[in-house]
Amino acid sequence: MSVDDRRGAPGVTLPLPGDRPFEEEVREVTAFLERVGAARHVLDTLPPADRTRLLRAVSQVHAPNRVQRRRASSAARMARTDRVEAVRADTGIRALRRRPVVTTPSVFAPPAFEPQDVHADAEREVTEARLSTAATTRIVSRRRRILAAHAVAYAVINALLFAVNFLSTPGEWWVLFPVFFWGLGLLLHAGFGLSKHVSERRLTREKRRLLEAASAGVTRLVERRTGVRVAGPVDQIEDPRLDEADEAARKQRGSRDQ
């Protein structure tokens, strides 16, 4: 039975006498070295040559020469690196790095491809969004104006009723009934007038009204404060002369109604 290179010269095979397993011999040698380590003074009884041989053998097993130590360290480091790389290879970032960075599109169009003008659809979507915004703004603004007029009428009329009640029948405060019930109605109106929700039917009707007004050239129907303007068949640049034209058209309609 033999063992490869007990930290001696590289490439040398040392024979092991007997047929005993190598593990048993290692256990016996280990027990012997432990006994010698417990009573180190017994080494002084050995001849110098035997003592030097024993210590050299132990040192070669514990710390081999520089070349073998470097080779063993390199092999252990490479094995550890291989294990780490094997674990990292399955991570998401490593898998993504193995994929192509840029996917080159096909130069030729598919056989069933039909060219379409995408800019027209985009322009139509933008116009529809602006028209919806303008219609919603006009509806909400009209609600708030009506609510403000209702609040002013409530305050003025109830003030007059209070004055009449105070001057005519000061002991009977019948004015509290219209103030209370009308106030309830005003609160309900305020809940509706301050809401920004617009039904689809009302929004569609308002957008149709804006489109008809833009086609007729009445640009003042569009909210200019928000910067939204509905374009008619021929878009016009706003200038001060439009106000004069609107004023003339209004006077003409007034005279026609009379």
Image: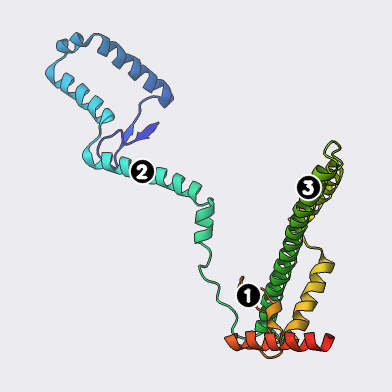
Using the rendered view, name the quadrant where residue 55 is placed.
Answer: top left
Please tell me which residue lies in front, 186 or 44. Answer: 186
> Relative to 124, is 162 on the left or the right?
right
- Tell me residue 129's x, y (percent): 69, 72
Label 3 to label 2, Cα distance in Å?
102 Å
Q: Nearer the viewer, residue 147 or 224?
A: 147
Q: Is residue 74 above or below residue 246?
A: above
Q: Amino acid at mark 2?
A: Arg
The residue under the point 39% across, 24% down is: 18
Picture layout, residue 46 above or below residue 140: above
Q: Which residue is mark 2?
A: 77
Q: 40 above or below 117? A: above
Do residues under tags 3 and 2 come within 8 Å of each other at their CB atoms?
Answer: no
- Classify 10 Å Cα crowding around label 3: few (below 14), some (14-19), many (20 and above): few
- Identify the mark at residue 224; answer none if there is no mark: 1
Sequence-first tag of 3 and 2: 2
